[in-house]
Amino acid sequence: MKENIKILFEYYLAGKTTPEQEKVLMKYLADTANGDSEFYGQMERLWTEQTTKADYSSTAANGLAEIWKKIEKRQPKRRLFPPLLKYAAVFAVIISASIGWYLYQNLQQPTQTAITFLSKTTQKGERLKLVLPDSSIVYLGAESRLTWPSRFIKGDLRNIRLEGEAFFEVKHDAASPFIVQSGEMQTRVLGTSFNIYAYPKDGTFSVAVRTGKVGVSENSTGKLRQLSLLTPGMKLSYHLKAHHYDIRNEPISEINAWIKNSFAFKDVSLANMFQSLERYYNIRFELKTNKLNNCRYNATFISKSINKIMEEIRIMSGRKLRYKIDNANKIITVWGEGCQ
C-alpha cells in the first residue's frame, strides 16, 4: 500500500492522476497520523526535485487552499500527532510547487475552447479553397455550403456537412475517420482525395475517387446502409428518389477538372448541362421551347468562355439549336427545332 501511495504521489505531481486516484491519495494523507517518516521522506525528495518549479503566486495559493479543503473534509476529529504536523509544511510547499508547474505547463499549451461550428457558402460563379483544422483541403464549388467544427478531437470522427459540390484532399488519420454528411448520404474515408456532387435540388448524389479508398452509405430509412467501397477511378451515382445507384469508371483527370475551369458531360440532358453551367458561370438560361428537352450530349469544355461553349453546343446540335446572349443581364435565351 505504501509503495502504491508513493507512486500515486509521483503521478499526481506529473499530472497523470484521475479524480478517483486523487481521492485515494487525499484520504491517505488525511488518515496518516502515525509518524510515517519514510513516506514523508519520499515527499521531501520529490520536493527537492521540484524546487525550481515552485510557484508562490496568489493563484497557486488559492489552488493549494482548495486541496487542503479536500484533506480537511476527510480528517478524523482528533488532534494530529507531531509527525504529521512536522511534514505538513513540506507537503504544502510540494503541492504549491506542483500547482505552479501545472499552471506553467498550461500556459504553454493552446487554450482548449469549446467546439463551435463554422460554415461557408458560395454564390453562383464563386469557388473557394478552404483548409480544415486537421490540414485537410477542400475546394468548394459554386452555390455550395460546407459546415465543419472549429477543431477536431483526436480519436473522434471528423464530421463535416456538405450541400453542393466539393473536392476533398483529406489528411490521413487512421484513428479519426473523416465523414462527409450530404443529406441522406454519408461518405467515409481515412485519408484520400475525392469529389462529391450533392446539390439537393438535382436529385442525384455522386462520389468520384481520385486517390485512396472511399466508403459510401445511405440513410434513407433511419438505418445506415453501406452501398460500396470505391477505389481510384470509380464513380458512384445515387438517384435519391428511386433509391437506386450505379457505379462506373471515371477518368482520373476529369474527377476534379472543374477546379481548373474544365467540365466534362457524359450523356446528360441539355437542361442538366445548362444547370451546371449556370452555377459555374453565374448566368441564367431561358429555354423557349420544349423541343430541346430530350437532347443529350457528350461534351468536354476546357477553360473556355461561356460564349465559346454555347457555340460548340450549337454545332453539336447540328446547328438546330439557336441562342442569344444578354451579357448585361447575364441571361442566355435558347430555342431551336430539336436535336441532330
Image (cartoon, grey):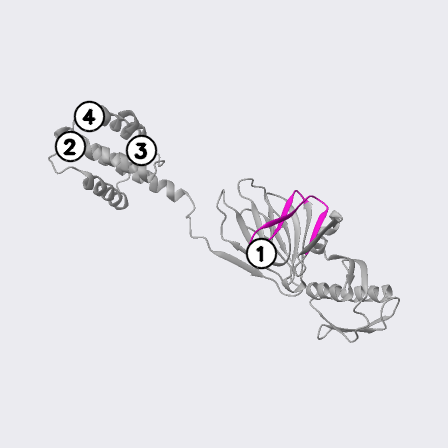
Please tell me which of labels 1 and 2 falls first in the chain: 2
Label 1 to label 2, Cα distance in Å?
68 Å
Is any atom of residue 326 visible in this view? no
Badge number at residue 52: 3
The kind of secondary structure element at disc 1 is loop
The answer to whether marks 4 and 2 mark residues whose Cβ atoms lie closer than 8 Å is: no
Please tell me which of labels 3 and 4 falls first in the chain: 4
Tell me the mark number nearer the camera, choosing from 3 and 2.
2
The kind of secondary structure element at disc 3 is helix
Structural crowding at the residue carrying mark 3, measured as other residues with C-alpha within 10 Å and reported as few (<14), some (14–19) or many (≥20) = few
Tell me the mark number nearer the camera, choosing from 3 and 1.
1
The answer to whether marks 3 and 4 mark residues whose Cβ atoms lie closer than 8 Å is: no
Label 3 to label 1, Cα distance in Å?
62 Å
Determine the residue located farthest toward the top in the rendered image: 38
Badge number at residue 11: none
Quarter of the rendering containing residue 57:
top left
Q: Residue at x 62, y 65 (%)?
A: 123
Please provide percent x and percent y for residue 18: 34, 38
Tell me the mark number nearer the camera, choosing from 1 and 2.
1
Q: Which residue matches tag 2?
A: 85
Task: Tell me the amino acid under the disc marked 1.
Answer: Thr
Q: Residue at x 34, y 40 (%)?
A: 102
Please provide percent x and percent y for residue 161: 56, 56
Q: Which residue matches tag 1?
A: 221
Is any atom of residue 267 visible in this view? yes
The answer to whether marks 3 and 2 mark residues whose Cβ atoms lie closer than 8 Å is: no
Closer-to-camera residue (65/226): 226
The answer to whether marks 1 and 2 mark residues whose Cβ atoms lie closer than 8 Å is: no
Magenta-tinted stretch: 211-238
328 magenta-colored: no
